[in-house]
Image (cartoon, rainbow, N blue to C red):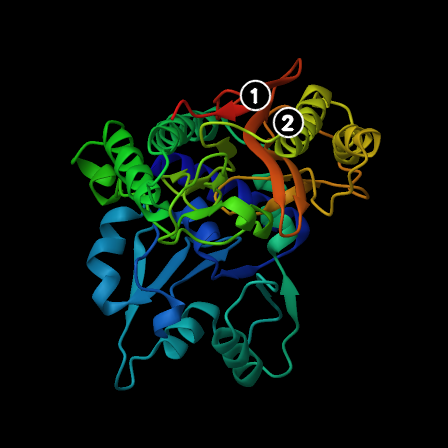
Amino acid sequence: MLDEARTRTLSLQARMRDMGIQRAVFTDESSIAYLAGFWGYLGIEFGRPTMLVVGAEEAPVVITPLMESEMVAAMTWVEDVRTWEDIGQRNWGRALVGALGDEPDEIWVERGSIPAIARNHLDETYPDVPIKDISPVLGAMRVIKSPFEIQVMKEAGQIANAMMTAAHGSLREGAREYESALAVIDAGSRRAATFLTDKGWERFVSPMIHNLQILQSGKDTSMVHRRASVREYQRSDPVYFCFCNMAQFKQYKLGFDRMFHIGEVTDEAARVQQAAIDAQQAAIAAIRPGIEAQEVAAAANEIYAARGYETGYRTGRSIGVAYLEAPELKTGDTTILQPGMTFAVDGGISIDGVTAGRIGNSVVVTETGFDYITDYPRTLLVTEN
């Protein structure tokens, strides 16, 4: 991972030189992980920013809280790790100025995600210095995944499949939603642990699956992103699992969704779910190099229209070290698909207060079409009990 991160940083520096960019400040956790190979556990939400300053001509600089510095120095390939403290004169603002210099000609930041306290500090410290957006430059690098990245994502896919198998196995009349969430966390964590050692950089990678499980059952399935509750499952209930905020490994995030039905399925629920499945499968079947991203969405939209349904869902999003990357599979996105792009591709219909149909998979674009990263039955799923 660290060799990969170093290579990416060298590539970024070459792009910066070609574009005349002297220095950029990265504050987004996914960007720092992508370039420096580490991520922290206490971040800006605690008022403790971690930053990576990349110069076109100089070695990069990591700026991190003193309490995180031992772990950060062991996790990253970057040699220049500068610390700051919560109290006294050695604050993060001074550390940042030390890395940027007193009179930079311009400063490039991740304009859409830089924390307000960091942006305010730059505006106050350098009132006459132009602030520009480095995000498109790094984003263009992240569009195409390397073979190494795809392998990590496929390992994440195996973890996600274990999670979905456990979700399926947890379903029965009288069981509760939170019990399913616990089964998912246990199965995913145990599978993730099989890919890790306690040596070197890997000793800092936790196998634990975390974040609140997105799970709805019964009439609440139309709510899309409700979290697991204490509700008991009833016969014929639809039950929806979304792993989009949980299916991740070594900072690589996937999209993965399934809908199940307890014991039996009503005719209406079956029609809605089958339409979502068929729309998603039409979209995935359209994926291949050379077509526009919006053409994938159009294939799904044709199915929705033919079945008499409307959807406000995009058909998919690019995935990687961030939950949302570019491009997106939706009307208006004319990006040409290329081998190495990775997407979460969804089928989604909501009928408020009644039911819903949903399915999601992660895929990678290949030279001839696509491969599944997550692979679970793509059919109407009805439990036996």
Q: Is residue 245 above or below residue 262?
A: below
Which residue is nearer to you in this view: 69 or 125?
69
Gap in angstroms between the C-alphas marked 2 and 1: 7 Å
Secondary structure found at label 1? loop
Instruction: State the residue at coordinates (36%, 30%).
Output: 159
| Residue 315 in which image quadrant | top right
Q: Is residue 122 visible to us here? A: yes
Quadrant where the C terminus is found in the figure: top left
Observer-nearest of 154 and 355: 355
Badge 1 is on which residue?
Answer: 379
Residue 198, percent from left and from top: 16, 36
Q: Quadrant of residue 62?
A: bottom left
Residue 357: which numbered mark, if any? none
At 66% from the left and 16% from the top, the residue drawn is 369
Task: Please rate how many residues cluster around mark 2, counting C-alpha atoms within 10 Å: few if below 14, some from 14 to 19, many from 20.
Answer: many
Is residue 13 visible in this depiction of the protein?
no
Identity of the amino acid at label 1? Thr
In this view, the residue in front, 77 or 114, is 114
Numbered badge on residue 277 = 2
Q: How many marks?
A: 2
The residue under the point 41% across, 44% down is 246
Percent x, y of residue 172: 36, 33
